[in-house]
Amino acid sequence: MRIKEFISFIIALSILLSGCNKKELKNETEEIIPVEVTLIKKSSIDRTIDLVGTLTAWKEANLGAQTSGRIQKIYVEEGSRVKEGDLLFEMDDTQLAQAKIQYQIAKDNYDRMKPLYESGSISQNQFDQIKAAYETAEKNYKLLLTNTQFRAPFSGVITAKKLNEGEVFLLAPTGGAPTIVTLMQINPLKLLLNVSENNFRDIKLGQTVEIQSDIFPEEIFKGTISRINPTINPTTRTFEIEVKIPNPKEKLRPGMFVRAKIYLGKSDGILVNRAAILKQLGTAAYYAFIVKNNIAKRVDVKVGKEFNDVIEITYGLSEGDYLVTNGQGILKDGLQVEIKNKID
């Protein structure tokens, strides 16, 4: 019995010693990963909101008659520059001519009867009828005049001419709103932008907005916020702002795609080399490695704005951490590392 117990003890001891030897061998052969690290420090960051949009005219008018009729004369072409009050086109003036004659007769009659009424030669009732006829004829003539001669409601550029002289303008033509010519004011221009509700408190009237176009990549145009929609769109969680952009040289044009940048000021944040941050495959999650006591520690991070080859980290890294900037691609949490280069 004692022999059996002794044999069992020997076997158990052999297994234990074998396990220890394997563990010691594993530790001796385990690879120590060489890495480079950088001390994390806070930096001053320009806080901006970056948006995109399409320029539109500050004012736009699709001009057409109030009733169907033949176009008698068009005084402008596409590209014509006009001032407020300039005559743009005229409709057939047959009715206008008749209305003008009736108006002139009623006016002459009113001018002739007014002194007689003031001297008591005619009654109040008679004069009231004459006055009413004159006022009606005047209103009818002015109405036909405004629907015959069409003038520019503001200064701008003719951007479209839909019909030609002699054609019949229909009040409800097939294919869209009734228009003979389109007038746009392109100095200044307007830019409508949708801003996240998270920035609602950051946006102020009069705030400067920088505008850039791929057509003029080296030039920055500046505008100001002229209107802020007071409500939030419940579907997109955004609110609309209007930017007024001076355009004295008219380099910018309606329809251009532009990038807009709104400056919110400066604040401290953590900026690191973009290559030091790893993305977990198949997800939108990011992580990085820091080193403590020569041991790699994996940390989940959240990223913010990108600035060329650096990126802001909003969560996961702290000032004073040593971030692995070279060798992180082969690291695992808990591996021993050797720091080959340290940047403080």
Image (cartoon, grey):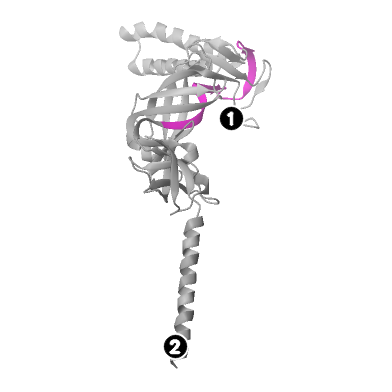
Magenta residues (range): 49-76
Furthest residue toward right: 166
> In this orientation, which residue lies closer to the viewer: 157 or 264?
264
> Where is residue 103 drawn, in percent x and y?
49, 12
> In this orientation, which residue lies closer to the viewer: 161 or 10?
10
* Residue drawn 35% across the image and 25% down it: 207
Q: What residue is disc 1 on?
A: 177
> In this orientation, which residue lies closer to the viewer: 57 or 258?
258
Amino acid carrying mark 1 in the image: Ala
Is residue 237 visible in the rendered structure shown here?
A: no
Quadrant housing residue 46: top left
User: Which image quarter is the N terminus in?
Assistant: bottom left
> Where is residue 239 drawn, in percent x and y?
41, 37
Q: CA distance from mark 1 to mark 2?
A: 105 Å
As helix, strand or loop, the secondary structure at mark 1 comes to: loop
Give yes or no for residue 112 being in the magenta stretch. Answer: no
As helix, strand or loop, the secondary structure at mark 2 comes to: helix
Instruction: Check the image and report above or below for 256 versus 309.
Output: above
Give yes or no for residue 72 being in the magenta stretch. Answer: yes
> Where is residue 39 drawn, in percent x and y?
37, 38
Looking at the image, residue 47 sits to the left or right of residue 260; the answer is left
Q: What residue is disc 2 on?
A: 5
Quadrant housing residue 195: top left
* Residue drawn 42% across the image and 36% down it: 272
Instruction: Check the image and report above or below for 54 versus 315.
Output: above
Furthest residue toward front: 3
Which secondary structure class fits the magenta region best?
A: strand
Amino acid carrying mark 2 in the image: Glu
Q: Nearer the viewer, mark 1 or mark 2?
A: 2
> In this orientation, which residue lies closer to the viewer: 151 or 54?
54
> Where is residue 191 drawn, in percent x and y?
47, 26
* Residue drawn 46% across the image and 15% down it: 138
